[in-house]
């Protein structure tokens, strides 16, 4: 396996063991792709796979700075790769025990208190554009894979639903808790789940606010494989190696499925605007619950990185 990352300032490509490689080993990749602040990116030349891990500077959620990195990430992938250079795109997280907690609840609370509908809509539209570009696999014949090693809540789960395949470790958990503080997930959950489960089952899941195990998600058909804890990366690697020869078939099958979805960016952004209007109707009690959840998630994330 020849997976490489780069130190942009030094313009040196390194393999995972830290040994120097020549930049000419991957001359088509823009060096900036490996220099994003909150995304760690590695390219495996053998399997033509791009591995990306979220590495948030604060609470593991989709903050404006994280969204900026995702936008740049997508732009740079489109600019760097031709169809035969990239076959698999993997997204995971470096936050221990957390894939992603979803939307930036602290920011949402500030914007709601300020009555700033335009900023809420702008945030939602940015998320929708990122998800829709992922559904469209950036115009490349890609198989996209979400690798879950921990909690995937709210927008974290919505983001995963835009991937072709989801591989989760046994202890991973999933949920849409927004209804607990009077809101609903506004960045794709209804659109994705209604197509995969049917509208009644989708609404039931959204309105429950429950946290689901990886096994429950597998039974629903929303994730594709469970691997033992600690083996997420190895499980994804096995999936890639197993499917390398039938890559074209996987791409074609997923394109056919998404054609039946007929999911437009406009549908996603319209739902986001309903979400923003609903958010502005939250009560002070709802906002306190939102703040408590955000603080609990922040403290959980901090504890997970504290030395024993």
Image: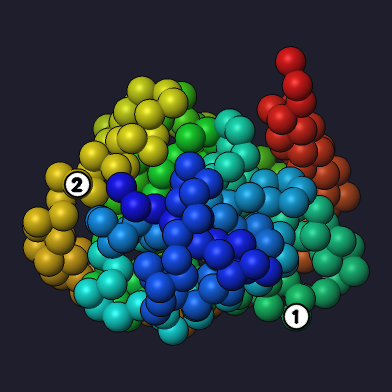
Q: Give the residue drawn at x 30%, y 68%.
A: 86
Query: Does dot 2 land on a helix, a strand or a loop?
Result: helix
Please tell me how crowded label 2 is: few (under 14), some (14-19), or many (20+) other residues with Cα within 10 Å.
some
Q: Give the residue drawn at x 29%, y 42%.
A: 237
| Residue 44 horizontal side relative to residue 299, left or right | left
Query: Does dot 1 land on a helix, a strand or a loop?
Result: helix
**Res 285 seen here:** no
Alpha-carbon distance for marks 2 and 1? 45 Å
Decide which of tag 2 and tag 1 comes sooner along the chain.
Answer: 1
Name, please, the residue furthest toward the top.
308
Task: Please determine whether, in this image, residue 227 is positioned above or below residue 267.
Answer: above
Q: Give the residue drawn at x 30%, y 80%.
A: 82
Q: Give the residue drawn at x 12%, y 66%.
A: 248
Given residues 62 and 276, the one toward you in this image is 62
Q: In x, y percent, where is residue 208? A: 52, 38
| Residue 295 horizontal side relative to residue 262, left or right | right
Q: In x, y percent, where is residue 187? A: 54, 63
Q: In x, y percent, where is residue 31? A: 54, 73
- Name the quadrant containing residue 132: bottom left
Residue 118, labelled with which disc?
A: 1
| Residue 24 horizontal side relative to residue 143, left or right | right
Residue 68, labelled with which disc?
A: none
Please tell me how crowded label 1 is: few (under 14), some (14-19), or many (20+) other residues with Cα within 10 Å.
few
Residue 241, labelled with which disc?
A: 2
In which quadrant is the C terminus drawn? top right
**Res 100 seen here:** yes
Given residues 98 and 10, the one toward you in this image is 10
Instruction: Tell me whether circle 2 and circle 1 mark residues in contact (CB < 8 Å).
Output: no
Given residues 246 and 283, the one toward you in this image is 246
């Amino acid at each position: 396996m020849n997976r490489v990352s780069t130190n942009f300032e030094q313009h040196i490509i390194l393999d995972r063991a830290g040994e120097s490689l020549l930049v000419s080993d991957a001359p088509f990749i823009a060096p900036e792709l490996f220099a994003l602040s909150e995304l760690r990116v590695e390219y495996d030349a053998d399997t033509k796979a791009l591995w990306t891990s979220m590495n948030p500077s604060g609470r593991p959620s989709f903050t404006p700075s994280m969204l900026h990195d995702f936008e740049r990430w997508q732009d740079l992938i489109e600019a760097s790769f031709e169809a035969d250079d990239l076959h698999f795109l993997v997204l995971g997280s470096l936050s221990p025990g957390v894939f992603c907690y979803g939307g930036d609840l602290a920011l949402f609370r500030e914007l709601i208190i300020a009555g700033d509908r335009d900023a809420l809509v702008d945030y939602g539209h940015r998320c929708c554009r990122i998800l829709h570009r992922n559904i469209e696999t950036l115009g490349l014949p890609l198989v996209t894979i979400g690798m879950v090693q921990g909690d995937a809540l709210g927008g974290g789960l919505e983001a995963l639903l835009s991937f072709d395949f989801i591989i989760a470790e046994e202890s991973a958990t999933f949920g849409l808790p927004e209804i607990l503080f009077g809101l609903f997930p506004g960045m794709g959950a209804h659109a994705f789940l209604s197509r995969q489960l049917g509208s009644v089952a989708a609404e039931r899941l959204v309105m429950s606010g429950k946290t689901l195990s990886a096994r429950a998600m597998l039974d629903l058909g929303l994730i594709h494989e469970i691997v033992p804890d600690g083996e997420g990366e190895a499980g994804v690697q096995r999936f890639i190696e197993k499917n390398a020869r039938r890559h074209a078939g996987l791409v074609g099958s997923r394109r056919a499925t998404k054609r039946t979805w007929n999911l437009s960016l406009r549908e996603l952004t319209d739902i986001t605007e309903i979400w923003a209007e609903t958010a502005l109707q939250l009560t002070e009690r709802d906002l306190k619950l939102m703040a408590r959840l955000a603080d609990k998630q922040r403290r959980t994330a901090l504890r997970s990185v504290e030395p024993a």
